[in-house]
């Protein structure tokens, strides 16, 4: 007997692969009836096994003539398909392809050169073209755009209002020498930039035509994970391309793509050329502007990001009105509210909010009475869900207008009102360089905090000068961090200055190592505020190992 795949050793994925089985008879002497009997039983077992294998693996199973979908399933699929088609047809007249031309600097080209002289010679266009002709003949050359000239690109956008304004991404039209907009009917009109906001990647352009319908705006704040969405644009230059997917996440502010981001994440295919195009719901309303993808291949990997329309429309209106975006500020630095920090501040571990790290003197926050350690829970009736979302909310609010703000202090809810001022990029503490005068006092001995993995020393004028601390700042300096300790896990480093300890829901200023030791001995958890010489700081919660 022989077989291409031995019986009993067929792979699990055998499926419908063809195979052949041939049986060869064997002659046994008649004087061995026992052998013949056993041989007959063996062959019977082989035949039965073969039949069972063929039956179980479906080698001879008939191929279905049509998909086995129930009538109800087919009906539902057609309904969804009809919905996609209806939305696509409705949106189509409002979606445009944007073609831009940008100048390229005419600089030299650096290439490896395996010969005498500089191994990376700087060659201009003509020298490089002559060199290429030597190696590749008279047709060996680079295209003009590689040496300066004009580069062309394609993006997407949508009609924003009935005045000819079109919204797209800043990176689509940034530095463009010429912008052309092609509408669904083939009409091509030249456009001009009205304004752009690179920090949020929003731009508004305008065409001298009001013949095309604006795309209705939805409410991105109502977007829910799992909802169907369509992305429309010109991926790789193919205009009016529609792809479908769901909302994968909302409030995605950890992509680190833009200065101000609060993305809607979707698995609808978004590719180069989709930038600036709309992400719409099944009502045909735009809820986002497609802006970026996470990929290693330049094409869709199922992770696309759209700027929420609530944020984009706010910025677009400002650009149309003023040609620029001026952001607002309260004058505070913030950090996320971790559950362990919430408990130390006398709050429920599930409390949502953001923690005030520092307050700029004279700022709206300072005038409203905000203090370090306050937990902001709401602004203008909107919850403070995260630092990025709160920052986005405040920065796009009206300057000079009064807003209500709610916060928690020592476990109690409080409210205040404040008026925003234009964003100032100054550091959040005054940089006052005061010379050190007088005789240097003798520094205190270093003190080790048992269990937390910290060694600290009081900040003296010499240490302040050594580490770069300026002004009247007080506290204890971290002089050592033990390996494997809670302090190391929290990324505390020597040279950082501990200025506050949270105890009994209150912020206690630190002025000596003895005071700090006394406070740290009262429990197995220690919440501190530590900062760098540049004034950047945050709250840390250290935990003493059990049994210490």
Image (spheres, grey):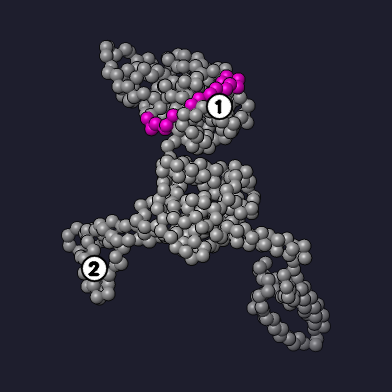
The residues colored magenta run 409-426
Q: Which of marks 1 and 2 is in front?
A: 1
Residue 455 on image: x %, y %:
43, 23
Give the structural element (helix, strand or loop) at label 2.
helix
**Dot 1 crowding, Cα within 10 Å, few <14, some 14–19, many 20+:** some
In the image: residue 62, left or right of residue 406: right
Front residue (pair 194, 225): 194
Measure how far apart labels 1 and 2 are at the Cα level.
Answer: 66 Å
Q: Which of 251 and 490 is in front in this view?
A: 251
Quarter of image, res 425: top left
Residue 404 quadrant: top right
Residue 178 x/y as whole percent = 36, 57
Q: Is residue 250 left or right of residue 118?
A: right
175 to the left or right of 213: left
User: Residue at image x 49%, y 37%?
Assistant: 396
The quadrant in which residue 180 appears is bottom left
The residue drawn where x is 30% and y is 67% is 143
The residue identified by callout 2 is 129
Q: Is 417 covered by the magenta stretch?
A: yes
Looking at the rendered structure, which numbered label has been put on residue 404?
A: 1
Residue 138 lies left or right of residue 386; in this view the side is left
Q: Quadrant of the N terminus?
A: bottom right
In the figure, 430 relative to 163: above or below? above
Looking at the rendering, in which quadrant would you find the C terminus? Answer: top right
| Circle count | 2
Residue at x-position 58% and y-position 33%? 382
- Image spot of residue 339 (x, y percent): 59, 30
């Amino acid at each position: 007997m022989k077989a291409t795949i031995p019986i009993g050793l067929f792979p699990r994925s055998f499926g419908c692969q063809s195979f052949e089985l041939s049986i060869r008879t064997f002659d046994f002497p008649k004087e061995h009836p026992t052998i013949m009997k056993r041989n007959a039983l063996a062959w019977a077992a082989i035949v039965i096994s073969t039949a069972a294998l063929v039956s179980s693996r479906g080698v001879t199973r008939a191929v279905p003539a049509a998909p086995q979908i129930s009538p109800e399933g087919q009906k539902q699929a057609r309904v969804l398909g009809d919905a996609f088609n209806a939305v696509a047809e409705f949106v189509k007249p409002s979606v445009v392809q944007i073609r831009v031309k940008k100048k390229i600097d005419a600089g030299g080209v650096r290439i490896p050169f395996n010969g005498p002289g500089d191994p990376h010679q700087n060659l201009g266009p003509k020298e490089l073209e002559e060199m290429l002709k030597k190696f590749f003949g008279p047709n060996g050359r680079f295209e003009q755009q590689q040496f300066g000239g004009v580069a062309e690109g394609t993006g997407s956008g949508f009609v924003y209002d009935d005045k000819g304004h079109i919204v797209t991404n800043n990176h689509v039209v940034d530095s463009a020498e010429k912008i052309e907009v092609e509408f669904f009917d083939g009409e091509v009109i030249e456009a001009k930039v009205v304004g752009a906001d690179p920090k949020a990647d929003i731009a508004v352009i305008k065409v001298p035509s009001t013949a095309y319908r604006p795309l209705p705006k939805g409410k991105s704040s109502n977007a829910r994970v799992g909802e169907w969405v369509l992305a429309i644009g010109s991926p790789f230059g193919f205009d009016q391309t529609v792809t479908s997917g769901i909302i994968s996440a909302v409030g995605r502010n950890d992509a680190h793509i833009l200065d101000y981001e609060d993305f809607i994440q979707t698995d609808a295919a978004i590719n180069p050329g989709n930038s600036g195009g709309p992400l719409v719901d099944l009502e045909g309303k735009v809820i986002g502007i497609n802006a970026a993808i996470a990929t290693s291949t330049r094409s869709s990997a199922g992770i696309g990001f759209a700027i929420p329309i609530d944020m984009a429309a706010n910025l677009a209106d400002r650009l149309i009105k003023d040609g620029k975006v001026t952001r607002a500020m309260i004058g505070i630095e913030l950090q996320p509210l971790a559950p362990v920090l919430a408990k130390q501040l006398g709050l429920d571990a599930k409390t949502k909010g953001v923690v005030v790290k520092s307050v700029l003197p004279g700022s709206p926050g300072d005038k409203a009475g905000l203090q370090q350690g306050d937990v902001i829970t709401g602004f203008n009736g909107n919850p403070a869900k995260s630092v990025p979302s709160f920052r986005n909310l405040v920065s796009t609010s009206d300057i000079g207008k009064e807003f209500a703000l709610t916060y928690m202090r020592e476990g109690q809810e409080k409210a205040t009102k404040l008026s925003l001022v234009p964003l100032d990029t100054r550091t959040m503490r005054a940089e006052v360089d005061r010379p050190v005068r007088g005789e240097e006092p003798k520094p205190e001995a270093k003190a080790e905090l048992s269990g937390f993995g910290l060694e600290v020393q009081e900040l003296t004028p010499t240490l302040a000068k050594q580490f770069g601390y300026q002004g009247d700042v007080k506290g204890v300096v971290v002089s050592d961090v033990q390996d494997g300790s809670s302090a190391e896990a929290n990324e505390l480093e020597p040279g950082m200055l501990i200025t506050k300890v949270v105890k009994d829901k209150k912020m206690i200023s630190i002025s000596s190592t003895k005071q700090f030791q006394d406070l740290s001995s009262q429990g197995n958890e220690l919440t501190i505020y530590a900062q760098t010489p540049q004034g950047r700081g945050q709250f840390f919660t250290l935990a003493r190992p059990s049994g210490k």
